[in-house]
Amino acid sequence: MSSAVMNAVVMGLPEGPEVLASRRLPVPQPGRGEVLVQVHAAAVSSPGRPVPPDGSSVVSPYVPGSDAAGEVLLPGPGVAEWSPGDRVIVLGEDPTDTRPGAYAEYLTASAGRLHPIPRNVSFLTAASVVRSLATAWAALFRHGRLGTEERVVVMGAANPDGIAAVQICRWKGIRVIAVSDGRHARRLGALGATRVVSHSAPDLTGRINTGLGEQGATVVIDVEGTALPASLELLESDGRFVVTEGAEKQLIDVRLMVERRARVIGSAGPIDGVDIAHILKLIGEATFVPVIDSIHPLSKAAEAHHRAASPEAFGAVLLVPDRFHTSSEEFAQLREEGRPR
């Protein structure tokens, strides 16, 4: 396939760093320890990649996107664990990786970044929920030390990671208060939230405490990185505040933190392969359901990014190569009929 070309989306153009444009590019070739994957669905991610910490810059223009679901097309030299036709989810973790990303018809990835998708889990489902479930799983279990008798508050609950946290709490039978835009209350309730509180409601802390039965939260998880000061007020003594994103600098009340013996925990780091395997098994058993806001053809990547940034968005926004495009309504119908795509 050395002379083959593919459709891709690039950024870093002279027109501006946020401009997304369709281009025809050579299909990348897998090097040693790499695998060539045909992309069936990619999760819409942050528009730009961070600059590598050594000060060097990524190749510009470049193909963004870190997570994709698809099929192995060609294992590179030294790769024995993957074969053509294997169904996989590719999860990017290295911000300094300058290889073309997931906004393309094909991508290459290190063999260790691939995880097998069960046959009864669709590409769209895998692309929409595996990353968010893994993020929420690590925040709640590995860093938040979630137990059985907990009271949880999820800040940013309409975010895919927040939706995942709500579903995990429902699965464990834990009382969970979802804080989000009020327009998403019904859907969050259906996913397992004990109560939904609008983030713009007056007396936000009081409303959340009412939902908790006038007890403090044992765990607050913030998936957007904007709610640290308010979150400390919600915690009971020895409570844990777990944050998965760092949106901005924030001031905290150290006195309150000390009085309540609160623990502030950043949840980041490499995704655990054992966790991914367990999560995929649970997805296959319908323990967790995919929540997809919208599905866009690759040629409409800019439209997808605008949708992902909208407060009306609820759940994952996906990109698919144009030849595989399925609308979110068609996907819902396929799920009802038990036909994964």
Image: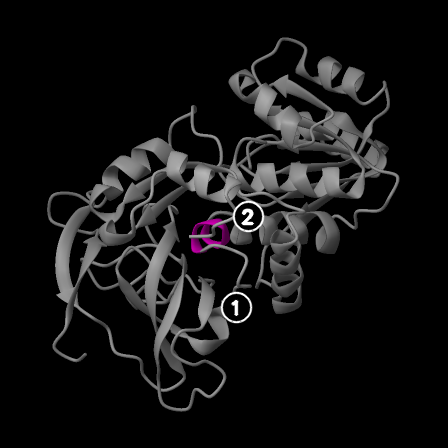
Residue sitting nearer the eye, 179 or 235: 179
Q: Amino acid at mark 1?
A: His
Q: Which residues are magenta?
A: 123-127
- Name the mark on residue 264: none
Q: Based on the displayed image, in which of its 4 quarters is residue 109 positioned?
A: bottom left
Residue at image position (36%, 90%) is: 77
- Farthest residue to the top: give it: 202
Residue under label 1: 115
Residue sitting nearer the eye, 255 or 320: 320
Compared across the picture, whether 233 is left or right of 12 comes to right
Residue under label 2: 132
Q: Find residue 319 and report its horizontal and vertical position in percent.
A: 33, 47
Residue at image position (47%, 50%) is: 339
Quick check: is 296 in the magenta stretch? no
Q: Amino acid at mark 2?
A: Ser
Q: Find residue 291 and report its horizontal and vertical position in percent.
A: 52, 38
